[in-house]
Image: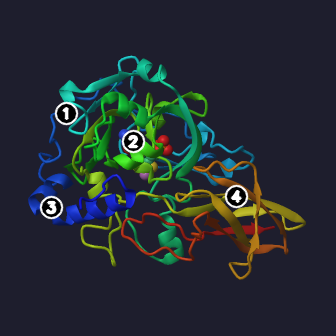
Amino acid sequence: MEDDLTDEATYERVRSRQWRESTPLTRRGLLGASAGAGLAMTAAPAPPARAAVDRPIVKPLPPDLFVRHGTNAEMRWEAMRGQGHLTPTDRFFVRNHVATPEIDAGTWRLRLWGGGLRGSPTLEEAVEFGYQDLLAMRADTMTAFIECTGNGRTFFTSQQGQQVTGTPWGPGAVGVAHWRGVRLSAVLERAGLTPAAVDLMPRGLDAAYTDQGVDMGRVRRPLPVAKALKDVLLAFEMNGRPLPPDHGHPVRLVVPHWVGIASIKWVGDIEVADRPLFSPWNTRYYRLFGPGHPPEGGAPLTRMGVKSAFELPWNARLPADGVQVLHGRSWSGNGRIRHVEVSVDGGRTWSRATPRGPHPSRSWLLWEYRWRCPGPGEYELLARATDETGTAQPDTTPYNTAGYLFDAVVRHPVTLV
Ligand SMILES: Nc1nc2c(c(=O)[nH]1)N[C@H]1C(S)=C(S)[C@@H](COP(=O)(O)O)O[C@H]1N2
Ligand SMILES: [Mo]
């Protein structure tokens, strides 16, 4: 029987097998080690003209809201204190492989092409949608978190004593926004999706990404057709405003529950293929590497894990007398949060936190915990969430060299003064 590549679990299994079995030559091409020749498999037209000087990130990054890491900016969790359900756009984290491109919505086109569409159009013959075409379609909205796969990576080192590579994110590479756009499924249908379609390859219009001198081409990552048809949005609004430059203007993908890299920003074209697709972003990156994993890495990562964070500065100083109401949020790539427990004694005893407000299914849960402060001194606050599948945050996360998917309970230091 043929493998059903529209099923997510089958997709992961089959893709990793195909990757293992691909010839070293093809694989080198896919990895981009062969001077980019294997990467430029299609003659991609140049991205539209951009501003003469691309700023790495366009929006202001005040130090009370952000920690900067190169072309990326992490949200400080204390910046969520007193906020509503959504992460305001002015403090939403930014993960850029290269600089934010400034793209004119008036000339922007989304081009769909490939063997999974009726007539198998090439990129030159692509089915095109302009910005106004998308605005004229039936709009859909979604409140969803986007989280970088490496969010919390530094805890591998600080809590587990392990060395990992990649952007040294603390806990703030996550945010929730209210997204508005059109369903990717609707656009695919209009473009002539056929049952032969297997994988999609949305590709950004930002400049090509170079890793250690190797040109990886533009940011793009295969997306199985099953996920694309399930709940993916082509978003043109974030929190009630047109998408700002840093978050993908004019249009980005929002792939809820999945690793942030799936949510391609500044999308310019989508190959719809009748065969498995590969890019460095599902082969070289975003797989688990290291002990216990195959040399080519585990299956391409899909869902994020379960996480929690306190809306407090790291090393917060709080008054020692009376009751402190601690606030936090928990979220999961598997669905809603069922409950959250808090420990104020380093993990010896746990009590339930009180849920607050709405909990959209692709978003986080807000919670509170009343802490009767025991007196001056140093403490560690822990929060542990369990989601609707029964998955709870573990005490430690199994090591992987790139420090992906840190989901263990975080030990948050505070001082009572
Ligand atoms: N075109 C493009 N899309 C991209 C990226 C990028 O660098 N270029 N970064 C990805 C990664 S790794 C993440 S975590 C999210 C971050 O989205 P944000 O910057 O809006 O928070 O965008 C994804 N989409
Ligand atoms: Mo990411």
- The kind of residue tagged 2 is Ile
Residue 323: which quarter of the image? Answer: bottom right
SS class of the residue under badge 2? loop
Mark 3, Cα crowd under 10 Å, few <14 / some 14-19 / many 20+, is few
Q: Earlier in the sequence, mark 3 or mark 2?
A: 3
Instruction: Tell me the CA gap for discs 4 and 3.
Output: 45 Å
Instruction: Tell me the CA gap for discs 3 and 2.
Output: 26 Å
Q: Which residue is mark 1?
A: 120
Residue 207: which quarter of the image? Answer: top left
Residue occupying the point 63% across, 39% down: 88
The correct choice, above or below, for 72 with respect to 372 in the image is above
Q: Which residue is mark 3?
A: 22
Instruction: Tell me the CA gap for discs 4 and 2.
Output: 28 Å
Mark 1, Cα crowd under 10 Å, few <14 / some 14-19 / many 20+, is some
- The kind of residue tagged 4 is Gly
Residue 57: which quarter of the image? Answer: top left
Q: Which residue is mark 4?
A: 328
Whether label 2 lies within 8 Å of ligand 1 gets the answer yes
The image quadrant where one finds the N terminus is bottom left
Q: Earlier in the sequence, mark 1 or mark 3?
A: 3
Mark 4–mark 2 contact, CB under 8 Å?
A: no
Place of residue 176 in the rendered image (x, y in percent of width and height, measured from the top left): 59, 45
Nearest to the observer: residue 212 or residue 372: 372
Nearest to the observer: residue 142 or residue 259: 142
Residue occupying the point 24% across, 51% down: 278
Nearest to the observer: residue 332 or residue 185: 185
